[in-house]
Image: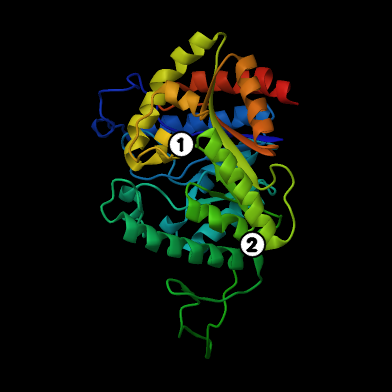
Amino acid sequence: MRTGIFLFGGVEMDDAGAGAPAPTDRRYDSKEVWRATERILDMGVVSDQLGFDSFWLTEHHFQYEGYEVVPNGLMTGVALAERTEQIRIGTMFNVVGQWHPLKLAEDFATLHNLSGGRGVLGVGRGTVPREAENLGTKIGSFDNPDAVDADEFNRKQFDEALDVIRLALDNESFSYHGDIFEYPVPGIPDRGGFVEELSLLPRPLYPYEIWQAITSPPTLATVPVKGWGGVMWLKNHQFMKQYWDQFAELFAATHGNELAAGEKRMLVVNTCVADTHEQAMAQVRNGHDEFWKFLGPYGWSRGYMGEGGKPAPPGLIPTLEESIENKVWLVGTADEVAEQLAWYRDFLGGVENLTLFPAMLGDPYDKVEEQLHRLAENVLPQLS
């Protein structure tokens, strides 16, 4: 089982938790943001030294509130590659619609080659209108009144952009003619003729993986057909099982071969480990509540189970106890968290790719480092 670490990468907060201040009432300056960025890189180095398989950054923009302060996981990943030896480096996720697709392809290939083949291409459609509509796309988030139209455009743009990216990465030369993108642009004169094809440089020198966020039924219907990996997070365990199995069924129906147990699917769970169960609950509560105070209004809790076994209503702000009941947060002693992870492995019929989210919003990085050690030294050995 390959085990990775995923960090949002925010600033340290001494007032995290439910209630005041409201997320938009916070404002951090460039010095505080940069300190957080350096500490995120430190956590990547520690994760490498502890033997984790992968380290996942984020891509977010304009977040003066201090929640996710890395705007370019690929550029930050290059710095991390220079400081590490073996760990694979990805972004969970590169928000494809916020990139020119050929620039995303070039930058990923650069990271992948400089790291000696340790880059992982994580792709997603985004969640935050503030970012999306200032960087070239739209997003159908819960608080966007034009959610349906925005989501339709975003999906089409995303699909075409991924077609372009794969063509560019996998072929010596290529052309593409879609409804949104066309490369090369028609009619470009070049040395007495016209540009008919393009060649991306650099291209990957090593095999690479693509992983996409799966948060909704339409995405679940698409990713296994495309043939790359699906990342599943913040879902009630029963919903997780449904998605896990449906992914395998759709993959087999499309490609004619069955997946091995857990193949091409990634389970992401949030964790907190302490000496006692009570200490773990106390340590994680404020960060958990800050997480949902920030992300609940964007509809992220729709993967939780509501009344009658149906998805929770958009905008739910769950309690820690609800998150534990949904098995989205795994909290307790090392033995308890290991037992819960082993339960998930059996419940899903095998987990090949596991990613842990051990840093809550606002956590001090010394605490994050302690969590990395507890997971690597006390929890994961129990799963081998």
Amino acid bearing label 2 = Arg
In-front residue for pair 220/72: 220
Q: Quadrant of the N terminus?
A: top right
Q: Secondary structure at mark 1?
A: helix
Q: Up-down: is 8 above or below 382?
A: below
The residue identified by callout 1 is 309
Q: Given contact means CB atoms under 8 Å apart, are the residues at marks 2 and 1 in contact? A: no
Q: Residue 26: x percent and y percent?
A: 27, 30
Q: Quadrant of the C terminus?
A: top right
The disc label shown at residue 353, or none:
none
Please give left or right for residue 272 compared with residue 144 in the image.
Answer: right
Q: Earlier in the sequence, mark 2 or mark 1?
A: 2
Q: Residue 288: x percent and y percent?
A: 42, 25
Please give left or right for residue 265 compared with residue 219 in the image.
Answer: right
Q: Residue 290: x percent and y percent?
A: 36, 27
Q: Residue 145: x percent and y percent?
A: 25, 52
Q: Secondary structure at mark 2?
A: loop
- Label 2 to label 1, Cα distance in Å? 47 Å
The residue identified by callout 2 is 203
